[in-house]
Image (cartoon, rainbow, N blue to C red):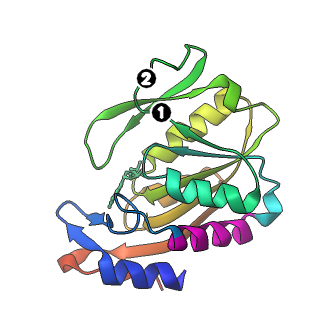
């Protein structure tokens, strides 16, 4: 997606450890217009999948997921990383190792918010090694629902996640695919 690639080149900062910082439009401050364009793009890419629900993980997946849900007119659910006092124990859970924070997150989704007849689209901000997406796939399988697709805003294609998800036979669409962050420079897959 050209608009997104241009924004990454303009505003992205490469940090040590192959981390791309995009906190001016996605990870801290959010650009609603760009998120809306992202939502429209995901709608186009997954239009044939009969999506009934979108799942993401808090917090950075929420903005692109909600704007995609708006375009598709389906509910959006975000997995919580911390147990809330308002959340009951009737939840699906999975463990996800966080690439950026280097900690294990115990993610959970209330069982009321995913059904066995759902065709679920997973949306996330980044794909690195695939841990976050795998945790969501695990929860969708626990609910006996169907994983209809995975929409990623920024994929770091030089890490393992994409290959793993492709090998699992999932329909993955990434709007920006980065082949390298070497020498603090962002290079996209051709
Ligand atoms: P994975 O679970 O695929 O290993 O990593 C994806 C998760 O880690 C995303 O949900 C995202 O929050 C975070 N992440 C991974 N790589 C980056 C990165 O380069 N920049 C930022 N901002 N987040 C990242």
* Residue in the picture at 43% in, 23% down: 83
- Report the magenta stretch's main SS: helix
Q: Secondary structure at mark 1?
A: loop
Report the disc number at residue 165: none
Q: Nearer the viewer, residue 85 or 43?
A: 85
| Foreground residue among 115 and 180 | 115
Q: Is residue 40 magenta?
A: yes
Residue 171 in view (yes/no): no
Decide if ligand 1 comes within 8 Å of the CB at mark 1.
Answer: no
Residue at 47 percent across and 33 percent down: it is 80
For the N terminus, which image quadrant? bottom right
Pointer 1 residue = 80
Q: Position of residue 111 (x, y in %)?
A: 66, 24
Q: Which residue is mark 2?
A: 83
Judge whether residue 132 is colored magenta.
Answer: no
Please tell me which residue is depicted at 44% across the width and 81% down the height of the picture.
Answer: 5
Left or right position of 88 against 143: left
State how many labels appear.
2
Which quadrant of the view contains residue 8? bottom left
Residue drawn 78% across and 39% down? 118
Residue 145 vs residue 131: left or right? right
Q: Residue 164 location, x and y as percent?
A: 51, 53
């Amino acid at each position: 997606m050209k608009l997104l690639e241009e924004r990454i080149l303009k505003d992205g900062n490469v940090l040590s450890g192959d981390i791309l910082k995009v906190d001016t439009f996605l990870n801290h401050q959010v650009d609603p217009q760009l998120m809306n364009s992202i939502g429209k793009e995901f709608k186009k890419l997954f239009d044939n999948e009969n999506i009934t629900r979108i799942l993401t993980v808090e917090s950075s997946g929420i903005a692109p997921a909600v704007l995609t849900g708006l375009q598709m007119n389906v509910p959006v659910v975000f997995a919580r990383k911390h147990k809330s006092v308002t959340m009951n124990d009737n939840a699906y859970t999975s463990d996800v190792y966080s690439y950026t924070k280097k900690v294990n997150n115990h993610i959970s989704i209330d069982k009321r918010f995913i059904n066995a007849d759902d065709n679920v689209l997973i949306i996330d901000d980044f794909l690195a090694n695939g841990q976050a997406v795998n945790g969501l796939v695990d929860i969708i399988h626990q609910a006996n629902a169907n994983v209809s697709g995975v929409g990623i805003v920024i994929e770091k294609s030089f890490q393992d996640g994409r290959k793993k998800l492709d090998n699992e036979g999932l329909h993955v669409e990434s709007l920006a695919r980065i082949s390298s962050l070497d020498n603090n420079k962002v290079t996209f897959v051709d």
